[in-house]
């Protein structure tokens, strides 16, 4: 199997999960790099790669996902995750397995009229159906067509005429490591690893999260038509003194970030054995720790932040 990365995604990156994964794929002799501008698929040494009948997992940003798939199709790739798989995963909310009710509508429709059943909420959680942005919005500001909110939605609509998923906004629990949210990698309908949304720090994922993830994996597999490879995000929600685990979202494997305990790889190279025992992090991060041991902490440092910052989360309360 090949792991294919998009050259344009890698430009200018240094200590980034995509680079760390690229390096591990190269160590496995399973790396190819596709260029959207050059319309090429090359090996690390610059030779053309023959993909006819070869299984390929694309690793890229969401912006380049569709174009990357189209390019690799021209080279005969057999995808681990197809465009149809991605479409089904983006429609995960239709599985009906969340405790909260989720609504789907376009940005333009939301700007015209907020569904009546959502008007009584104190706050709404709004996110783009495809990866892009999320926001917490006071419904009164939508009803009153507050200029700041309308301008924000208009700008987002100009970008890609996006479809939105809306639900009642429910707070998530927070502890000393941040939001009590976890990411789970599912390959061939098997839960293979779990991580909190952290980088660089050895940590454990609550057993309750792993058990809930396993329960959902079995539930999804029983549907019989859902893809067998995906990313599952869970969170601990708190509402009216009630705390419970629920699905945050599903995401395609191809364009989802891996956190420090996660891995898209299923093979461990011999040289990471000792580091894996000590750190218990993802294969590619173990391999990176050989070259950059000071980048990873066994114990949380008081002066270091282990969460990724997102510039695509907004609040209009």
Image (spheres, rainbow, N blue to C red):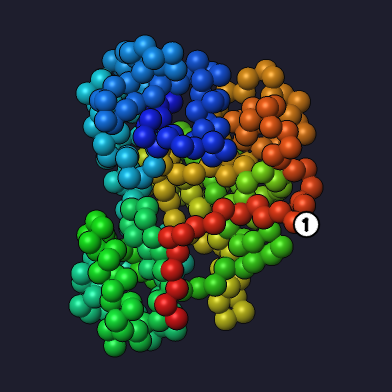
**247 displayed left or right of 205:** left
Please tell me which residue lies in front, 164 or 43. 43
Please tell me which residue lies in front, 317 or 89. 317
Across and down, in percent, residue 107 comes to 25, 67
**108 displayed left or right of 270:** left
- Number of marks drawn: 1
At a point 62% along the width and 79% down the height, the residue shown is 241
Q: Quick check: can you spot residue 280?
A: yes
Please tell me which residue lies in front, 141 or 95. 141
Across and down, in percent, residue 78 comes to 31, 24
**104 displayed left or right of 1:** left
Instruction: Indicate the quadrant containing the N terminus: top left, top right, bottom left or bottom right.
Output: top left
At a point 24% along the width and 75% down the height, the residue shown is 111
Q: Secondary structure at mark 1?
A: loop
Please tell me which residue lies in front, 316 or 194. 316
Across and down, in percent, residue 221 comes to 43, 43
Instruction: Indicate the quadrant containing the C terminus: top left, top right, bottom left or bottom right.
Output: bottom left
**78 displayed left or right of 112:** right
At a point 50% along the width and 73% down the height, the residue shown is 170
Specify the farthest residue to the front. Answer: 12
Q: Quick check: can you spot residue 229?
A: no
Residue 4: image quadrant is top left
Badge 1 is on which residue?
302
Residue 48 sits above or below residue 4 on the image: above
At a point 36% along the width and 34% down the height, the residue shown is 8
Near mark 1 (Cα within 10 A), the count class, few <14, some 14-19 or many ≥20, is: few
Across and down, in percent, residue 250 comes to 43, 51
Residue 152 sits above or below residue 73 on the image: below
Residue 18 sits above or below residue 111 on the image: above
């Amino acid at each position: 199997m090949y792991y294919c990365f998009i050259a344009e995604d890698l430009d200018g990156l240094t200590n980034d999960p995509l680079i760390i994964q690229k390096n591990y794929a190269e160590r496995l002799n399973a790396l190819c790099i596709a260029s959207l501008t050059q319309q090429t698929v090359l090996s690390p040494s610059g030779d053309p790669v023959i993909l006819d009948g070869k299984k390929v997992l694309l690793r890229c940003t969401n912006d380049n996902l569709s174009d990357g798939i189209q390019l690799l199709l021209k080279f005969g790739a057999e995808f681990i995750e197809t465009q149809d798989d991605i479409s089904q995963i983006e429609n995960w909310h239709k599985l009906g397995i969340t405790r909260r009710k989720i609504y789907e509508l376009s940005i333009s429709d939301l700007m015209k009229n907020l569904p009546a059943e959502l008007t009584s909420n104190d706050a709404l959680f709004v996110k783009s159906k495809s990866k892009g942005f999320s926001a917490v919005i006071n419904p009164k500001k939508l009803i009153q067509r507050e200029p700041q909110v309308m301008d924000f939605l208009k700008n987002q609509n100009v970008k890609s005429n996006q479809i939105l998923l809306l639900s009642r906004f429910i707070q998530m629990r927070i502890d000393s490591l941040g939001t009590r949210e976890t990411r789970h990698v599912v390959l061939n309908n098997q839960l293979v690893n779990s991580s909190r949304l952290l980088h660089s720090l050895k940590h454990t994922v609550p057993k309750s999260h792993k058990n809930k993830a396993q329960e959902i994996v079995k539930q999804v597999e029983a549907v019989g038509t859902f893809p067998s490879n995906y990313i599952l995000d869970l969170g601990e929600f708190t509402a009216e003194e009630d705390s419970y685990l629920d699905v945050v979202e599903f995401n395609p494997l191809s364009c989802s970030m891996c956190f420090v305990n996660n891995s898209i790889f299923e093979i461990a190279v011999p040289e990471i054995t000792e580091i894996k025992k000590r750190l218990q992090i993802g294969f590619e991060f173990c391999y990176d720790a050989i070259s950059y041991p000071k980048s990873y902490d066994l114990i949380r440092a008081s002066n270091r932040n282990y969460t990724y910052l997102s510039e695509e989360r907004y609040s209009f309360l």
